[in-house]
Image (cartoon, coloured by chain):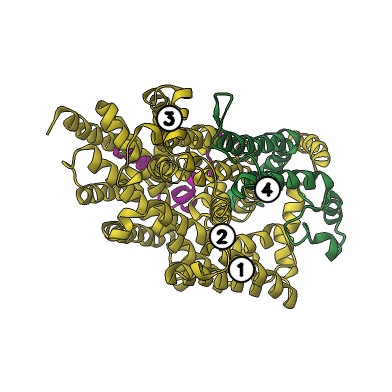
Amino acid sequence: MGVITAATLVGIVAYLALILFIGYRAYRKNIRDDRDDRYLVGRNLNTLILVGTLFATWFSTFAFLGGPGTFYLNGVNWLLFGFFNSLGPVLIMVFGVRMWALGRRYGFVTPSDLLANYYDNSRRIRLLVAVVAIVVLFPYSAIQLSGISVAVEALTDGVVNYTTAIFFIAICVALYSIFGGSRAVVWTDAIQGFIFAALLVSTAFLVARWAGGWVDGWAAATATASEKFAFTGDTGGSYFTLLLLWTFGWVLTPHLWQRMYMAKSAQTLVKSSVIASGLALWVTTFSGAVIGFLAIGFIGDIPNSDALVPTIYTNFLPAMGVLLVIATFAAGMSTLDSQVISGSSIFSLDIYRQYRPNADAARLGRVGHRFEAVFVIGLVIFALLPAGRELIIPLASIGVGMALVFLMPLIGALFWPRATEPAAFWSTAVGWAVMLVLEVGGYAEHLPTTFGPPAWGFFVAAVVFYVVSFLTEPVSRESQDRFHGFLAEAFPSVEAAKGRIGLALSNLWMR
Amino acid sequence: MEPDNPDTEGVQRAEGRAVPQDRRTGRILGVVPNSWRNRIFFAWALTNFVLTFLPVWDVAFNSARIVGGLLPLTILWSYLVFASNMMLGIVLYFTWARRWAQKADWDNRFARLNGDSAVADGTEG
């Protein structure tokens, strides 16, 4: 074992010790058996922490490994990475603030809470949304484990092999998620997000230097593989599919959805939306593009594009290996822990409580912990399979793609009182079934366009949603009042808002 | 985006008057905003979407030629469109979202003071 490998191992241990220490501090601060505190950090996140957790939760190992690797492998076909990461956060101003207001008003914790509550407390919608949400989380979580482990194996020259890394990381994440709850997750997210962003930007600068400078680097890259710098004109369908699912993933994936509830205020959320859009575009996607595209000009063929960044460092600056592993840990763990906590809340509140309505908070907390343990074990098993090891980008897209089935029911709850309970249920069920059948059966290839399964599933879900809505009765007037009535009063036109702020101030003073 | 339910609805509700069903339907099919200002923002987002696809469909701006020593044309064009997405967020924030959110925060503070918020009193959602 060389000096660099030894230093890398020491760095990993030191980093994990820091994360576990933060988890312990969060554990000491947590309020026992308090649902909001455990899953939503007491709905009290300020702008800095919220931006940190949004950023770190959204950008996982795929952004650090798969992202640059896909630019390197597929060229401009991965430019959509920049589109959805610049527009996705803006959706927080459209959807997120309303979700926040409803969550705070009615105490929602999970996506099912909001949707089931609007559709006249529909039990079948609650269960269906909960099951889909857990299935959404699973593959996306599994690739965090595999992504980190691929990097660790590469950067330690195999001293820590893939399997050992999987077990080590799983134990660490399980410990601080189970004991530290969402507080540990968002605290570590803020730190991990900073580490990950700093390393990504630094890597982009270094790669530009190693490529021979900005101008020469691009010239070499375009000369090496000019076909990777222009579209062929026949990839519009897959481009559209990925763009659609990843843009809406910013608000629809369960762990991001719950971050809307966590904000301290509406102002916090809208500020975070703007900041996250800028950071995501320039820090993550542009840096990833620079790394991936410039590498075309000076890195030869590599067997696994996900190992691009580790390969670059191994060739040019092996001493940076330790920081690279830490950045990869940061990117992966900050997403994985959020997903574990999200899955736990969904299982205990949306599934278990439906069958044990009298379970108290302590009981629900214990069930949540057990779910977290089972979930992590499932992830370990999956990550050890060949599919979990090799398909970082496709697996992430499959997971996020399924979350698209929540879009139509959410539009009904926030914007369209004509929506009905049968429409929400059947659009979710049929849309999800179409996605699964096309994905698992591989039938999408036989359809007349290059749209992927998530896009087909979404189209079908939208048609079912509108058709069934016009054929059935809308939700009760009470539900419409609780949602649309409340939102109309909470978010009036800007001119009216100006006047109402003054009125609110004077009323507060009078109290 | 900014609420499409006309503000008069809030006033009607506050005064205890029934709000006509057709006024409660929000956006057209829940998607297209009712107000012209919001339609402009909506159109801006859709335009960015279409502009993104110009090189993808090989209609324009699809080339490996490096422009001004900066970036290959396809990448440069795409990042200009992506920057327009970010600008949309900034314009939305400064034209209405900031003040709109401020109002919502005051309402929320009142709800907590009055015990109307589930979060304030710990009731189930």
Residue A164: x percent and y percent?
20, 49
Task: State the green chain.
Answer: B
Q: Chain of mark 1?
A: A
Residue A474 highlighted magenta (yes or no): no
Q: Is residue A96 left or right of residue A138?
A: right
Give SS at disc 1.
Answer: helix
**Real-space Cα distance between discs 3 and 4?**
31 Å
- The overriding secondary structure of the stretch rendered in magenta is helix
Residue nearest the observer in this picture, A357 or A262: A262
Q: In the rendering, which numbered label is found on residue A220? A: 3
Residue A475: x percent and y percent?
70, 70
Q: In the rendering, which numbered label is found on residue B50? A: 4
Task: State the yellow chain.
Answer: A
Judged from this view, the residue extending furthest toward the bottom is A471
Mark 2 = which residue? Answer: A404
At x 57%, y 64%, the residue is A449
**Real-space Cα distance between discs 1 and 2?**
9 Å
Amino acid residing under circle 3: Ala
Q: Quadrant of residue A480?
A: bottom right
Amino acid residing under circle 4: Val
Residues marked 4 and 2, same chain: no
Q: Are marks 1 and 4 in contact (CB under 8 Å)?
A: no
Q: In the rendering, which numbered label is found on residue A461? A: 1
Camera-near label (3 vs 4) is: 3
Q: Quadrant of residue A299?
A: top left
**Real-space Cα distance between discs 1 and 3?**
46 Å
